[in-house]
Image (cartoon, rainbow, N blue to C red):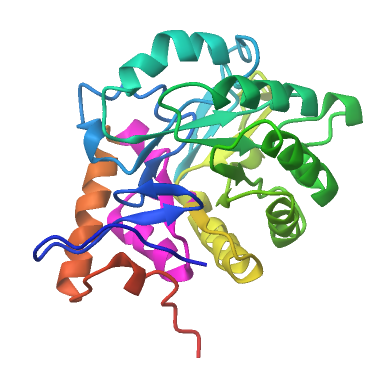
Amino acid sequence: MIATSGENRGDSPNLSVTIGRLDLKNPVMTASGTFGYGEEYAPFIDLNRLGAVVVKGLSLEPRSGNPPPRIMETPSGMLNAIGLQNIGVRVFIDEKLPFLREFDTAVVANIFGETVDEYRRVAGILNGAEGVSAIEVNISCPNVKKGGIAFGALPELAAEVTRGVRGETDLPLIVKLTPNVTDITAIAAAVEAAGADAVSLINTLTGMSVDIETRRPHLANVTGGLSGPAIRPVALRMVWQTVRAVKVPVIGIGGIMTASDALEFFIAGATAVQVGTANFVNPTAVLKILDGIEEYLVRHKMADIAELIGSLKTG
């Protein structure tokens, strides 16, 4: 289930991991939608130190997203209803990808669509783009041809999208799972069987917030995606369950703010982690988390992060 790559240098622990056919120098990635296209954070951190940059979700054509207000702070988290605003896949390749190619860091393109054909077309365009290391497929989006049900809500729909994208690209394929389902392991198993090289979880939980004085929703969209520390225990539980249900690597996402948070996911079996909401609080959070992981391995005399992954003791 877990593979590592690279050699340990000196006294520093080996942090490299492999996600399918994607080799990462360390397991700390950014989460899509929280790190822009990478260049927004370049003034604050050295992008070369990251395991991977996962860019803002890309659609076939540009999207303006939902009307404001579309972000709301909540206790230990935040709600967002951005509506997947983005510049479109072709503009990304022409205007954003050249900047990212300057760094020695994997670039993961997150994609979405409202139909299977849209997913396929976006993946096909990215397949030949120089500098794209892998594709992450967001299946939390509504399928307009199925009455608006999310692609990730049913195993058969999730598998259909995965097969469609797999047929258009030879890039490593990560499928990002929604937690808004009865059994996330069934979805994970379905996309694994359909050709996914890895799964990442969780995406945001659906929530809402109300202004009691006006008795109106705080978000114009009424509901939004809940992220941040409030969802971490749920995310950790789902990652642990999914690791036991599939053979492909699992990438942990959800409320990771510190190195200690990330370490919980590794111990539960995640091969890598993605950091999201923490980037809004502290632009250097990803590097502090990376440093903390290395310090932990040194303190516990572990030469390789593989010794930590999946080391949970339940008996």
Note whether 110 is above or below 51 in the view shown: above
Q: Is residue 174 magenta?
A: no
Estimate the x, y position of residue 122 in percent, counting from the top left. Answer: 64, 22
Measured along the vertical axis of the image, is residue 173 above or below residue 111?
Answer: below
**Looking at the image, which residue is at 76% across and 44% down?**
158
Which residue: 40% across, 26% down? 131
Q: In front: 149, or 48?
A: 48
User: Which residue reaches farthest bottom?
Assistant: 315
Whole-percent x and y of residue 169?
A: 62, 33
- Image coordinates for residue 132, horizontal then vertical, percent: 45, 29
Q: Taking the image as drawn, is residue 311 in sight?
A: yes
The number of numbered discs placed on residues in the rendered structure image is 0
> Is 101 on the left-hand or right-hand side of 292?
right
Q: Which picture quadrant has residue 173?
A: top right
Query: Which residue is at the front of the view, 5 or 221?
Result: 5
Rendered view: 28 above or below 244: above
For image coordinates 82% across by 48% down, the residue present is 154
Q: In which quarter of the image is residue 135?
A: top right
**Residue 114 horizontal/vertical position (percent):** 76, 24
For the record, the magenta segment spans: 253-281
Q: Is residue 152 left or right of residue 308?
A: right
| Res 139 visible | no
Does residue 30 appear left or right of residue 299 in this picture? right
Vertical order, 258 against 152 (above or below): below
Residue 258 magenta-highlighted: yes
Which residue is rendered at x = 75% and y = 41% of the image? Answer: 163
